[in-house]
Image: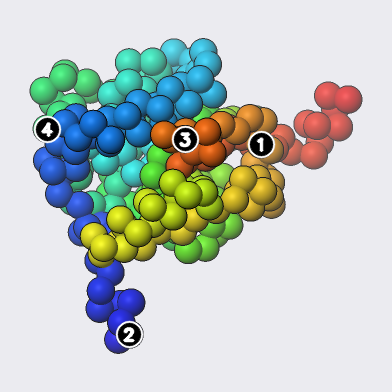
C-alpha cells in the first residue's frame, strides 16, 4: 500500500452528514460557494425538469438538490455510495413528506445500480473524485434517454480550484481538477453534446464548472429529422 492509499479516505466513508450540512448552512464561505453553484445549476436547467419526468441524481448527499428536484418532477432516483448520507437523506425525505424519491446504494462508474434510462440526470460534486472522467461520464450517459439532458460539475484548474484541492488533500480526500476544454471534450466523446457551461465561485474564473449537455439521438432519428 502506497502513501496515497494510506492517507486518503475512500470517498464513500469520507463524509459526516451533519458536519457537511452544518458547513453549508453556517460557514459564510461555504454558504456563498453553494449559493453560486446552485444559481448556475438552476439557470442552466431553466424550466426543466418537466412535471412528468424521471430524474437520476448521482451523489445526492444530504439532499440539497434532491428535495428541490422532487418538487419539480414525477420521480427522482437518487444513488449514493455513502451509507451515512443515505440514512441522513432518508430521514430528511421522511421529515419533508417526499415520497417520490427512490434512494439507492450505488457508485460510479461500474456499480451505479440503475438499469433504466431517465429523462434527465444531475450530479453535483461527485466527478470531483473521478480520476477517469471519461469512464464515469460514459456510465452516466448510459443512464440517460436519447435526447435527454445531463448536468454535471467538475472543479476547475483555476486559483480557486487549486485552493480547493489543497483543502481536500488536508482533509484526506483527493480531487481532480479539469479545464473547460477537457470537460467538454470528454462529454462529447461519450455522446453528451454540451449546450451550455457556466463557472461558479467567488471569483470571475470560478471554482466549479457546471455543464449542461444533451444525449445524442440515434443516427436514424437524427437523419430523419434533417
Residue occupying image coordinates x 54% and y 39%: 205
Distance from the alpha carbon under mark 3 to that under mark 4: 35 Å
Query: On the picture, is 109 further left or further right than 7?
Result: right
Q: Is disc 3 placed on a helix, strand or loop?
A: loop
Query: On the picture, is 199 further left or further right than 84?
Result: right
Residue at numbered disc 4? 91
Residue occupying image coordinates x 13% and y 43%: 19
The residue mark sitting in front, 3 or 4, is: 3
Q: Is disc 1 placed on a helix, strand or loop?
A: strand
Q: Are the residues tagged 2 and 3 within 8 Å (C-beta)?
A: no
Residue 152 appears in the figure? no
Distance from the alpha carbon under mark 3 to that under mark 1: 23 Å
Distance from the alpha carbon under mark 2 to that under mark 3: 36 Å
Whichever of labels 4 and 2 marks the residue nearer the N terminus, that label is: 2
In depth, the one of 22 and 12 nearer the eye is 22
Residue at numbered disc 2? 2
Residue occupying image coordinates x 85% and y 27%: 224
Q: Is disc 4 placed on a helix, strand or loop?
A: helix
The residue carrying pointer 2 sits among few (fewer than 14), some (14 to 19) or many (20 or more) residues within 10 Å by Cα, namely few
Q: Is residue 121 above or below residue 172?
A: above
Whichever of labels 4 and 1 marks the residue nearer the N terminus, that label is: 4
Query: On the picture, is 137 further left or further right than 52?
Result: right
Q: Are the residues tagged 4 and 1 within 8 Å (C-beta)?
A: no
Residue at numbered disc 3? 203
Amino acid at each position: 500500500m502506497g502513501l496515497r492509499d494510506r492517507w486518503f479516505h475512500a470517498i464513500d466513508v469520507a463524509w459526516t452528514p451533519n458536519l457537511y450540512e452544518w458547513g453549508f448552512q453556517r460557514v459564510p464561505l461555504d454558504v456563498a460557494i453553494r449559493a453560486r453553484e446552485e444559481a448556475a445549476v438552476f439557470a442552466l436547467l431553466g424550466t426543466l425538469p418537466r412535471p412528468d419526468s424521471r430524474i437520476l441524481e448521482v451523489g445526492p448527499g444530504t439532499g440539497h438538490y434532491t428535495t428541490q428536484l422532487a418538487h419539480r418532477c414525477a420521480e427522482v432516483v437518487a444513488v449514493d455510495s455513502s451509507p451515512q448520507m443515505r440514512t441522513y437523506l432518508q430521514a430528511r425525505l421522511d421529515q419533508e413528506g417526499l415520497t417520490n424519491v427512490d434512494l439507492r446504494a450505488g457508485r460510479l462508474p461500474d456499480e451505479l445500480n440503475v438499469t433504466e434510462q431517465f429523462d434527465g440526470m444531475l450530479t453535483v460534486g461527485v466527478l470531483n473524485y473521478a480520476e477517469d472522467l471519461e469512464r464515469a461520464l460514459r456510465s452516466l450517459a448510459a443512464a440517460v434517454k436519447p435526447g435527454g439532458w445531463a448536468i454535471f460539475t467538475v472543479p476547475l484548474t483555476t486559483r480557486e480550484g487549486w485552493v480547493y484541492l489543497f483543502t481536500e488533500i488536508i482533509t484526506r480526500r483527493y480531487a481532480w481538477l479539469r479545464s473547460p476544454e477537457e470537460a467538454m471534450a470528454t462529454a462529447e466523446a461519450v455522446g453528451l453534446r454540451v449546450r451550455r457551461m457556466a463557472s461558479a465561485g467567488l471569483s470571475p474564473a470560478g471554482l466549479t464548472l457546471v455543464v449542461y449537455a444533451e444525449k445524442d439521438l440515434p443516427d436514424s432519428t437524427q437523419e430523419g429529422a434533417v
